[in-house]
Image: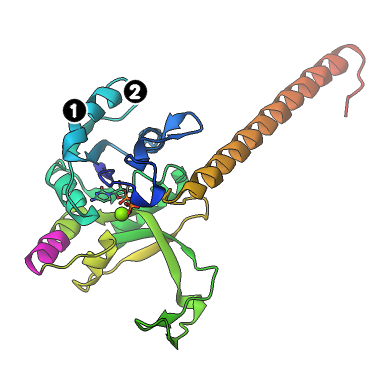
Amino acid sequence: MVTAIFPAAGQGKRMQAGMNKVFMELAGMPIFIRTLLKFSGCDAIDKLIVVVGRDEVDFIKGIIGRVPGLKPYKVVAGGSERQYSVRNGLAAVDPETEVVLVHDAARPLVSEETILATIEAAKKVGGAVAGVPAKNTIKVCDDNAMVQSTPDRRFLWEVQTPQGFRLNTLMKAHELAAREDFLGTDEASLVERMGEPVQIVMSDYKNIKITTPEDIVIAEAFLRSDMAGRAINTVQEKMNDIVGMANVLKDKFFNKRVE
Ligand code: CTP
Ligand code: MG
């Protein structure tokens, strides 16, 4: 069984929208609903756990209850930090789960290929993280922004979500982090510090985390270009069907072919 946890209990401060950004609409649909539908369309996913603010639980249950096509889900209350929200989500995971995925509700553009590849790598390695090679040169600086070193870009990856783990691995990592008061910015860092392996899975540059207002513009542009691509493919398929039918008729009646 594969269970996906969606941290959605942030405040979206950098979006400056005066609300939790994952409830904002992206091309006519709330961001977190897009994310949940993307995973629900994936055969490999069995259950969803949505983690929202303590005072948002009932409101969100009401909204999600009206969305057709979702996999079985639970809505649970999050915490003051993303890591605490994920921990609350983990506490609600069905113990029969083999692989647990954690995916930011604010990343609605993740591809099905990335979701599947993360599950497969998590089963094999124990821990897997979607990511892309860093495009920019990255500097390590001190507190005064004085450059200390320049790591070789060949070894730098920008990591995203989903991040997938065998259930007991992520449970153990969260328990250790809680005991030692360690706060990481992603799940993998909690697993890495136990010395357990984590592999990067090649994702794509469209899987952005919607964080600041310009990300909405970028994400809508990606959605528009996907829609245009799908429309062109449909027209091409229809054209091929028409030419195919015309050839059947020509073969039958005139023994000539249309090109
Ligand atoms: N998140 C969460 N619980 C928190 C903080 C964040 O579940 N206490 C979730 C967010 O809802 C988001 C994901 O973790 O889906 C990634 O976090 P981020 O992009 O930082 O979102 P916010 O914390 O909402 O945004 P900001 O940091 O700008 O306030
Ligand atoms: Mg945040």
Q: Position of residue 215 (x, y in %)?
A: 49, 48
Q: Which mark is residue 58?
A: 1
| Identity of the residue drawn at 26% across and 60% down | 187
Look at label 1 and name its amino acid.
Answer: Asp
Answer left or right for 86 relative to 129.
left
- Mostly what secondary structure, the magenta segment? helix
In the image, residue 127 above or below residue 149: above
| Identity of the residue drawn at 34% across and 41% down | 18
- Residue 196 highlighted magenta (yes or no): no
First in residue order: circle 1 vs circle 2: 1
Along the viewing direction, whichever of 133 and 117 lies nearer the viewer: 133
Q: Secondary structure at mark 2?
A: loop
Span shown in magenta: 172-180
Quadrant of the frame with the N terminus: top left
Answer left or right for 255 relative to 195.
right
Q: Position of residue 225 (x, y in %)?
A: 62, 40
Q: Position of residue 121 (x, y in %)?
A: 35, 57
Label 2 belongs to which residue? 67
Along the viewing direction, whichever of 240 and 49 lies nearer the viewer: 49
- Residue 126 visible here: no
**Which of labels 1 and 2 is toward the front?**
1
Answer left or right for 227 relative to 57.
right
